[in-house]
Amino acid sequence: MAEQKRDYYEVLGVDRGADESTIKSAYRKLAKKYHPDMHPGDKEAEAKFKEASEAYAVLSDADKRRQYDQFGHAAFEGGAGGAGGFDFSGMDFSDIFGDIFGDFFGGGSRRASNGPMKGQSIHTSVTITFEEAAFGCEKEIELVLKDECPTCKGSGAKPGTSKVTCSRCGGKGKIVTTAQSFFGTVQNVTTCPECQGTGQIIKEKCVDCHGTGYIAKKKRISVSIPAGIDHGQRVRIRDKGEPGINGGPRGDLMVEVRVKEHPIFVRRDYDIYSNAPISFAQAALGGEVIIDTLDGKVSYEVKAGTPTDTRIRLRGKGIPSLRNPNMRGDHYVTLVVQVPTKLNEKAKEALRTFDAETGNSLETKEGDVPSSKKKGKKKFF
């Protein structure tokens, strides 16, 4: 009795709704892990490689995948050739095995290495205040950037000389090698190590830039920080990064914003939180209190009998939105009643009178036992 095949989706470790790129990525990992060239003579690895290849051959083809989803393995019974009786003819594994053998033999991407490439991005940071983050600002940063060498005009060659065609790759910038795989001969394209993919060699290098075509210069760059930016977010300045390769554009400058802590305000998304002290009299009688906000000091009318830790909301006094500066968050203020600790005798007497008149006196009648002295009661000071 023939051994029952595993479900193809299970073999690749993907969901039944996985897209093409997910299936391809899953197979690439398994192919690298179990390829026979990596495990010579290992029958178990070879079997797993065949199983994964068969699953990929079906699930990567829209028509075959549709048949498999409807009929399962029965859709391909009786096929000849290939691993496990499956026919691999017509399947294109070149891009995957190009990647695999590129890894085996020190290669890499199959992209034309001597084509124009964008330069690398440069990363730096800038520190700003809480208020600058809220309302935006302009900052200047100093960086060392590469500029075209004025001596050789960016060619890298000594003035009066020029680059010559690389003899190793014939000016193509790439080397084509072949390797024997489970499916036969596979071609692999790697970057030419002699010319680094440029297709040209500099015989006599420029003495000022040492053949790079660029010199380092210290520059000051203005950075526009948008209103509403938060700590850790970045600002991209295009074309201020490393120079491109083979005529490609410059990379970008990525500026990470670091926001200093504020002594009063705490930010949460676009809202601000803070505390505001109010006097015992203000809490009891009500009245006007002055509150610090991003827009300066504002007046707020406290209601009589306001308890401590009451939170109020100042609409539109928070952080402007990054997407729409006309929209702002809110400012939430916790009112903290300040209990006086230093009172003269006159003030103390006034409080005793107030306490007695409001019925909150702590004095006890003759014969009563203060609650702090009753059994089982804890005494508070």
Image (cartoon, rainbow, N blue to C red):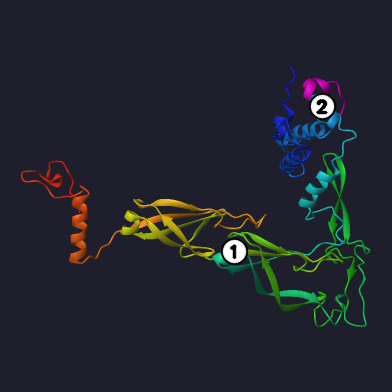
Disc with the residue nearer the chain's start (2 vs 1):
2
- Residue sitting nearer the eye, 378 or 285: 285
Q: Amino acid at mark 2?
A: Arg
Q: Tell which tag, 2 or 1, sits nearer the viewer.
A: 1
Give above or below for 157 relative to 111. Answer: below
**Horizontal and vertical percent for residue 288?**
41, 60
**Which quadrant would the N terminus be assigned to in this image?**
top right
**Horizontal and vertical percent for residue 336?**
37, 56
**Horizontal and vertical percent for residue 79?**
86, 24
Characterize the magenta stretch by its predominant secondary structure: helix
Q: Which residues are magenta?
A: 69-81
- Residue sitting nearer the eye, 58 or 238: 238
Q: Residue at x 78, y 25 (%)?
A: 69
What's the CA distance linking mark 2 and mark 1?
A: 54 Å
Q: Secondary structure at mark 2?
A: helix
- The quadrant in which residue 144 appears is bottom right
At label 1, counting other C-alpha atoms closer than 10 Å, the crowd grade (few under 14, some 14-19, many 20 or more) is many
Q: Which residue is mark 1?
A: 133
Q: Is residue 155 magenta?
A: no
- Residue sitting nearer the eye, 132 or 300: 300
**Horizontal and vertical percent for residue 105?**
79, 53
